[in-house]
């Protein structure tokens, strides 16, 4: 069906909104095993960017699975639909000039490529939050690995279901080796030039 309300998107252009905010929108798509550090990094990145005056929105299981995607399960099709909707929501934020920080295991390259296609390659950073399985299992932040080993959870990513490491991530942080501060600093260093509004166009 044709979009009968196209004009409402165009009252203010993306560029005008970005000028208002003094920043450029983009998506930081954090991917990695459970316990690799996505949530921790998302929160620290948000704090660090807020200190620099940047507006962000974290999207994670807490606000997505309980809201817009509360009718989706964990079967193959629903996982795909989960990521598709997250990417579409992300695109809206990004086009409003907001830096979105996505924290989802997103285990397959195909899923992450779909997100990149929907959001647009120019606005998308694939951030590989990389800690080895044994480190994640040792941390066991949510007690999930213990449940997996006890046979209470099936098809857990990294054990019963595959995690495909990004082939060519835009940013790679080895959170098993770096501190949280070092990891955040590295990510901010890479993305800050992309977020900062060019002085000539303000
Ligand atoms: P995820 O969201 O990927 O499941 P969490 O952020 O919930 O992972 O848990 C990661 C745990 O690892 C936290 O307890 C965090 O303090 C710890 N950690 C240690 N080093 C790092 C690092 N460099 N980056 C992120 N987290 C780290």
Image: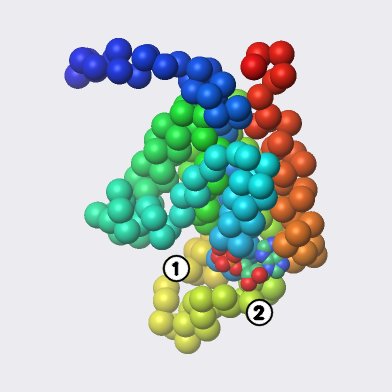
Quadrant holding the C terminus: top right
Neighbours of disc 1 within 10 Å: few (<14), some (14-19), many (20+): few
Task: Identify the image quadrant of residue 11.
Answer: top left
Is there any visible trace of residue 83 in the rendered image? yes
**Which residue is located at x 65 percent, y 79 percent?**
138
Characterize the local packing of mark 2: few (<14), some (14-19) or many (20 or more) Cα atoms within 10 angstroms.
few
Residue nearest the viewer, comparing 101 with 167: 101
Looking at the picture, the colour scheme in use is rainbow
Is 162 drawn above or below residue 46 in the view shown?
below
Q: Nearer the viewer, residue 65 or 99?
A: 99
Point out which mark residue 47 bears. Answer: none
Horizontal and vertical percent position of residue 118:
45, 31
Residue 86, how many percent across, how many down? Answer: 41, 43
**In the rendered image, which residue does mark 1 sit on?**
155
The Cα–Cα distance between marks 1 and 2, rounded to whole angstroms, is 19 Å
- Please tell me which residue is depicted at 74% across the width and 39% down the height of the picture: 190
Residue 166 seen by the camera: no
Which secondary structure, mark 2?
helix
The image shows residue 69, relative to residue 6, as above or below, that is: below
Quarter of the image with the N terminus in it: top left
- Residue pointed to by mark 2: 138
Judging depth in this view, the residue of 197 and 3 nearest the camera is 197
Q: Quadrant of residue 33?
A: bottom right
Question: On the picture, is 28 further left or further right than 119?
Answer: right
């Amino acid at each position: 069906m044709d979009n009968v309300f196209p004009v409402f998107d165009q009252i203010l252009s993306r560029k005008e909104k970005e000028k208002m905010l003094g920043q450029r929108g983009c998506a930081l798509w954090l991917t990695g095993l459970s316990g690799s550090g996505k949530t921790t990094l998302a929160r620290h990145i948000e704090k660090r960017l807020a200190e620099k005056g940047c507006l962000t929105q974290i999207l994670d299981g807490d606000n997505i699975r309980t809201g817009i995607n509360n009718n989706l399960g964990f079967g193959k099709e629903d996982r795909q639909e989960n990521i598709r909707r997250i990417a579409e929501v992300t695109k809206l934020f990004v086009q409003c000039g907001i830096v979105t920080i996505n924290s989802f295991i997103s285990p397959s390259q195909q899923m992450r490529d779909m997100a990149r296609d929907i959001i647009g390659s120019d606005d998308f950073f694939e951030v590989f939050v990389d800690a080895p399985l044994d480190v994640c299992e040792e941390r066991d932040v949510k007690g999930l690995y213990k449940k997996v080993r006890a046979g209470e959870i099936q098809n857990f990513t990294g054990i019963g279901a595959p995690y495909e490491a990004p082939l060519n991530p835009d940013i790679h942080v080895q959170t098993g080796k770096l501190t949280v501060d070092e990891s955040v600093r590295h990510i901010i260093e890479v993305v800050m030039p992309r977020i900062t509004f060019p002085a000539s166009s303000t």
